Image: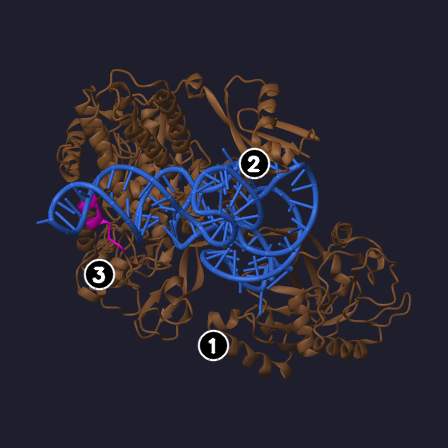
Chain colours: A brown, B blue
Amino acid sequence: MSQEFDPSAIEAKWQQKWEEAKIFEIDLKKAKDPYYALVMFPYPSGDKLHVGHWYNFAPADSAARFMRMKGNDVMTPMGFDAFGLPAENYAIKSGIHPDISTRSNVQTMVKQLKRMGCMYDWSKMVNTSTPEYYRWTQWLFLQMYEHKIAYKKEAPVNFCPKCQTVLANEQAQDGTCERCGTTVVQKNLNQWFWKITDYAQRLLDGHKDLDWPEKTKIMQANWIGKSEGAEITFDLVGHAEKLTVFTTRPDTLFGATYMVLAPEHPLVEKITPKDHWGAVKAYRELVAKKTELERTDLAKVKTGESTGAFVINPATGEQIPIWIADYVLVTYGTGAIMAVPAHDERDFDFACQFELPIKPVIDPDLSTSLFSHYVYPQYALAKAPGSNIVGGENERWNKECREDILRGGKCWIGPGRLINSGFLNGMDVDEAKKRMIAWLEDEGKGRAKTTYRLRDWLISRQRYWGAPIPIVYDPQGKPHPVPEKHLPWLLPTDVAFKPTGKSPLTESKEFIERTEKLFGKGWTPEFDTMDTFVCSSFYYLMYLASEGFGMMAPHFSETKEGKSEKNHLIDPHIERTWMPDSMYIGGPEHACMHLIYARYVQMTLKDFGFVSHEEPFKKLVHQGLITNKGAKMSKSKGNVVSPDSFVERHGSDAFRMYLMFMGPFTEGGDWSDTGIKGIDRFVKRIHAMFTANVNKKVDQPDVMAALHRTIKKVTEDIEALRFNTAISSLMEFLNLLDGEGGVSKETAKTFTLLLAPLAPHLAEELWESLGGKGFAIEQQWPTFDPALTKASTHVIAIQVNGKLRGDIKVPADASKEDVLEQAKAHPNVAKFLEGKPPKKEIYVTGKLVSLVI
RNA sequence: GCCGCUGUGGUGAAAUGGUAGACACGGGGGACUUAAAAUCCCCUGCCCCUUACCGGGCAUGCUGGUUCGAUUCCAGCCGGCGGCACCA
């Protein structure tokens, strides 16, 4: 019957034909309907491509092929995020230079990717570790420097004393070194930052125009962490200096009974009197020794120390004590808080621990009078109308509070009305916030203030395998940018990979000599390299920067005719045509890193005038995660599944269809190869049907109706990336043809085109054998005739009181009356009607009758 | 703790207010074969009635609600996954 079917041979044949015809190479300037289909570029790991990559790339390719057949000029590029730690760690272990291992990994992965048969435009490939690429990473740094976005300040790094290396946060996760288990220490280094915080509001505002998963936008919004509140200034007792705090609850100022500074706060030394200094210093040292994990452990008891200093609460005029405690973070707000223990859980815990006064200022009970006989149900405090709990009663109050903790009491953080709060009394929380801010502004003691959790981007890495920061220091240590004409500022190669505790580039003689030769004696280069997230923050532009600009034009850094010409990243016309990217597909793990950095860099480039759009990625989709035995695939767990043997056995078409058929693209799942057989059979049956059984002149009307329904379903499903159901509807149609014993040539060709995005090689082979002209991928996507999708008869389900009691077959144009009549006449239905007329009769056209008795 | 997602046969799943389990895998039975593989055909959620046909009941994590009708919408609870986590 069917001739020998050899997917490997077919796939190799068509991959070669596609390449020879260069049909996937896009002329960026001539595109009329540009569609930029982008996937997150991979890291060229020694693990090669695994099924997770396939699960990302293959369906993305199917979607891109579909868009091409719909008539778009589709550009879908591929590249490598090639700088980074794994190659360097491998070099430390093996002595093999990262450039060599990276190039070899890239080569292997390109080969594997080509075996997939995706329609990548390889002429536009990028590799972030090549000088042609990283000259632009450095150019970006210079732009940031010129626009005062790049700045230097001291910041701690994780350092492993045993390995003598700086560790990324992910490598130091539970406070110990990932590799040797040694306790990680914090070291302060002078490092480069990019001011991303200036863009916090724009990063939030931009979300509204993005077709992104809501989940991802929420994650970013939480990461940016906008808080609105007030900054309040407190006068210190006996000092000229003032203490400023940030609070989201200015309404509770009357309830602020003490202050807390972060242990690292600079005022601590100035305000602590001698008799408290010993204890304060000891506490600071204790905190400094704690690991990040110990410090952020929520289960632990709160610790702290009194400074012996006081401030004046501007609302009450009372003196309140200043403490230091490590539950206050020096990195957020002003590094200091006003503590309102009655209405903040952390302050409440702390106050109970150290017996500090707790003064309620919010009455949670909105339904009863302001002067209810107790303040909180939890506290069960007797309270006379109008009395002030704190005044003169601190001792008793604390005692009862502590008893209450033993009973599981808590503070009140919800809404309510203000009490014990002078001019705020009786107001609700929102109103009181506004009134308090207005009062503070009038008094010159505070103002409305918005704070973000987002921190500036630390881009310095004390690592070798990254783009060198293009900065040199004069003999006085003042930084100067490396002029653009010296880009790429090459990564030196005379470096051994033995960790010394310093940035590896400090070992390079060539690097230091080069700097002195160009800039003068005593000048030194910046020895740190850039975070790899910098490299990946603009790579989507570099794919487009191929003609006369960007990567292919290093000469652009030269001056022409003595004029100083500005370096441009990208041809403005191409940028306007192709950006923002039409579809971006990649993993959700990048929600708060790459996907924020790329948006930020795009915004800065727009501000500098190099691009025309504020947002790089208009539509974003996350593919699901493929796990193995419930765990994320990783080399260290030894559970990485290689696609190669499956591809060899079943072919790329079958393997990619299997991945798509497994379930919804965005959901992923646990890896299992049971079921690949089903797709294997499907592929073989398709081949048999459309080579040996194209034996009909015309197809029956019901076959034609099914065909048009299939076109409709497959079109809508691929558009929505529902590849699993697209494939199952093709299976259903093939099952129907099997029943018919054959198919017409016209229908065979249409089916072949429907298959083309999903099984591209097989589709080409069938297209050729059916006598189609050109490539299948170059054909118009089939359209359906809505009139033909309609069936001539309907099966109507009949429900009595919501339960299915039978069904009837009626012509599609049957009237409601006829259908109801027939439904009631159905013997099993009549049995349940018991001869009585139904109370209610509902007819859903073409589908169902519902009778109520 | 907070935020988000998720829960359906032995398995992957489908159906987003209208016949729950499409399409597959696996399993059982049969055909072909010396045999196996491959291929093809039939059966396959659980329970009850029945020789059989025809029927009936239960079932989408749990408990309620809205509706003629709920896997789908609403409320509360339980389990799983992911993110953030002393952010004032």
The residue that disc 3 covers is A508
- Name the image quarter holding residue A154: bottom left
Mark 3–mark 1 contact, CB under 8 Å?
A: no
The answer to which image quadrant residue A357 occupies is bottom right
- In this view, the residue farthest toward the right is A385
Please say if A821 is above or below B32: above
Tell me residue A796's x, y (percent).
53, 28
Q: Which of marks 2 and 3 is nearer the N terminus?
A: 3
Q: In this view, does A583 lie to the left or right of A205?
A: left
Label 3 amino acid?
Answer: Ser
Cα–Cα gap, marks 2 and 3: 85 Å
State the extent of the magenta-drawn residues as a range.
A641-651
Q: Does the magenta stretch include residue A592?
A: no
Q: Split into 4 quadrants, where in the image is the N terminus of chain A?
A: top left
Are marks 3 and 1 in one subunit?
yes
Q: Are marks 2 and 3 in contact (CB under 8 Å)?
A: no
Distance of mark 3 from mark 1, alpha carbons? 34 Å
* Chain letter of disc 1 in the image: A
Q: Mark 1 points at which residue?
A: A289
Nearer to us: label 2 or label 3: 2
From where the camera sits, is residue A281 visible? yes
Q: Earlier in the sequence, mark 3 or mark 1?
A: 1
Q: Mark 2 points at which residue?
A: A805
Q: In terms of depth relative to the viewer, which is nearer, A436 or A660?
A: A660
Residue A21 position, x and y percent, is: 17, 26
- The alpha-carbon separation of the residues under discs 1 and 2 comes to 74 Å
